Image (cartoon, helix red, strand yellow):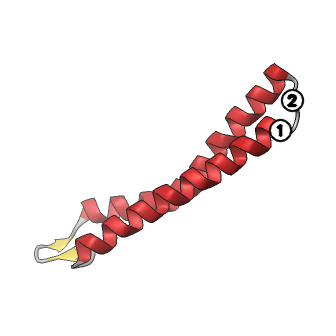
Amino acid sequence: MGILGNKGFDFRKAAEMSSVGLLLPSSIAVGLFFGYLLDKWLGTHPWMLLIFLVLGVVSGLLSLFREMKKHMHDQD
């Protein structure tokens, strides 16, 4: 069943699906933020920024795939 359930529009499902689009950019932003702070603190420019950027992308993709898998399982 999709967003429309037996009783009409399912706001819970719509809210869950709208948050999926923010998973990847927010994970990347957090990685960039912490990488920048660590680079500034340790003086290792640009290594921590690059490492945490990659970690943010990987974390965002894993979260995105988990949510998509959960949504596909709920539809069955």
Q: As shown in the figure, which amino acid type bears the numbered disc 2? A: Thr
Near mark 2 (Cα within 10 A), the count class, few <14, some 14-19 or many ≥20, is few
Location of residue 37 (image quadrant):
top right
Q: Mark 2 points at which residue?
A: 44
Q: In this view, does 55 lie above or below 34?
A: below
- The quadrant of the rendering that contains the N terminus is bottom left
| Residue found at the very far top of the displayed protein | 41
Q: Nearer the viewer, residue 44 or 7?
A: 44
Quadrant of the image occupied by residue 32: top right
Q: Position of residue 5 (x, y in %)?
A: 17, 75
Asked if residue 58 can be seen in this view, the reply is yes
Tell me the residue at 78%/39% (across/down): 49
Residue of label 1: 47
Instruction: Please say whether residue 22 is visible from this viewpoint.
Output: no
Q: Do the residues labelled 2 and 1 touch (CB within 8 Å)?
A: yes
Q: Residue at x 77, y 33 (%)?
A: 36
Which dot marks residue 36? none
Residue beneath the point at 11% across and 73% down? 7
Crowd rating for badge 1 (residues with CA inside 10 Å; few <14, some 14–19, many 20+) = some
Residue 39 versus residue 52 in the image, above or below: above
Percent x, y of residue 53: 71, 47
Quadrant for the C terminus, please.
bottom left
Q: Is residue 58 left or right of residue 53?
A: left
Asked which secondary structure carries label 2, the reply is: loop
**Amino acid type, residue under disc 1 in the picture:** Trp
Question: Tag 1's secondary structure?
Answer: helix
Q: How far apart are marks 2 and 1 (CA)?
A: 6 Å
Give the percent coordinates (x, y) of residue 47.
Answer: 83, 38
